[in-house]
Image: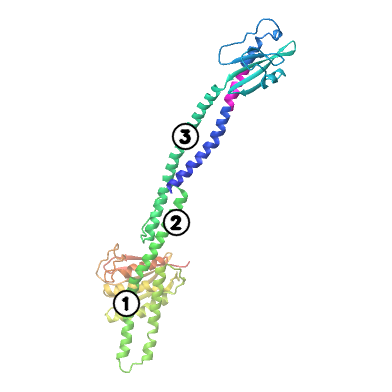
Amino acid sequence: MRPRIVTAIVGVAAVAVLLVGIPLALAVKHLYTSQEVLRLEREASETRRAIDATTLGGAGDPIELPKTGPVSFAVYDPDGHRIAGTGPSVADTAVRAALLGDVRDARFGGAIVVAVPINGNERITGALRASKSASYVVDRTRRTWVAIALIGAAALLIAALLALYLARRLTRPVVTLVSSAERLGAGDFSVRTQPSGVDELDHLGHALDTTAERLGGLVARERAFSSDASHQLRTPLAGLRIHVESALTTPGTDLRAALEGTLEPIDRLEETVDSLLQLARDTQVERSPLDLTRLVNELDRDWHGPLASAGRPLRVTVDASIPAPSISEPAVRQILDVLVDNSMRHGRGVVTVDVRRVPGAVAVRVEDEGTVVLDPTLIFQRRNDNGHGIGLALARTLAEAEGGRLVLERPGPSPKFALLLPALP
């Protein structure tokens, strides 16, 4: 790519030099020739004034013409015959024009010729012809052309250097973008580009960075889905299995009623899978005002038995004046399940779920009477050590995806988590 850019720029510069240089060279040649013709006309006019026009063609004193310098002079009578000086014996076209009263210049055999009329007694009595070799003009023109050529070559060299600089400046960020795109295609979503100073390339780099960030987040969510799903589905599947096995092994059990009792847990499992898939794929979900009172009562119903079997009570309090937050119900259900499950597994004593209104939001607090002191910087990190650490990380991710926040209000003893949900005005 770089050689093509350099070649293109140098080619354009060469065309520009030719378009300027050739007319300039022709103009210089014409200028030098015109200057020499004017100089020769001036010398011919000065020499003509020294000639006695009344003696032309007579038997008077001979005509004396200057013989020094590169200019040769010749005098012609009205009939076109040379009567003095150096030149053709018979008048040429320039002399014939001068005999008619014109000042004429011409080129003959590598010489510049100027002929002027000689006037006497109000009539043309002859003509003066001045000639000079054109080698001086040729040499001067050639030297100027060489100078123009050198200047053109210098301009092309400068253009080549500038083209090389611009090519490097343009191709370096392009090569970097190509390398970043290849890394992105190979699965390196951490790739980021650096500003190059070229607006178009910087816009492309920003788009590539956005794509990498988007793809990285999407792939990370997809990879986390299997861990999140297995962690969230393990407990309800185990309860469903116990329910079915109990119905099958207990004599006289109404199997139809037992199967009907599995429908609600299965619906809950479907909601769990749907919410996890929505989070993994970053899809838009429908958010409508949520009846938190009903949801917390269902939470009490679902977890009362498991906690009671462990000898631990569950207390639920709901402020009657709470507003309805606009949020996904499956997401909130998953978050609360994670918090209660965490209290049951790692806490002690009474598990309390309290729903209160706070400025600009609704706070759902879950606490227990455990003696452990939690580390706020590690508790929400996804450790994935035998399933531990996944639930709280997932719960915080779900809360942030819904525009809420999940925080650890009190590390312990008696740790307290608070889910802050945006409330409708």
Left or right of 287, for residue 234: left
Name the spot of residue 340 as percent of width and height, x first. Answer: 32, 74
- Mark 3 or 1, which is nearer the eye? 3
State the mark number for residue 153. Answer: 3
Which residue is at the far right? 122
Badge 1 amino acid: Arg
Q: Secondary structure at mark 2?
A: helix
Displayed quadrant of residue 363: bottom left
Residue at the disc numbered 1 = 234
Mark 3 or 1 closer to N-term?
Answer: 3
Q: Find residue 171 and report its horizontal and vertical position in percent.
A: 42, 48
Q: CA distance from mark 2 to mark 3?
A: 43 Å
Q: Nearer the viewer, residue 197 or 379?
A: 197
Residue visible at 47% across and 49% down in the picture: 199
Magenta highlight range: 30-41
- Looking at the rendered structure, the kind of residue marked 3 is Ala
Q: Upstream in the sequence, badge 2 or badge 1? A: 2
Q: Is residue 56 left or right of residue 111?
A: right
Q: Is residue 310 left or right of residue 269?
A: left
Which residue bears the numbered disc 2?
207
Q: How far is mark 3 from mark 1, CA to CA?
A: 80 Å
User: Which color scheme is applied?
Assistant: rainbow
Residue 405 visible here: no
Q: Helix, strand or loop at disc 3?
A: helix
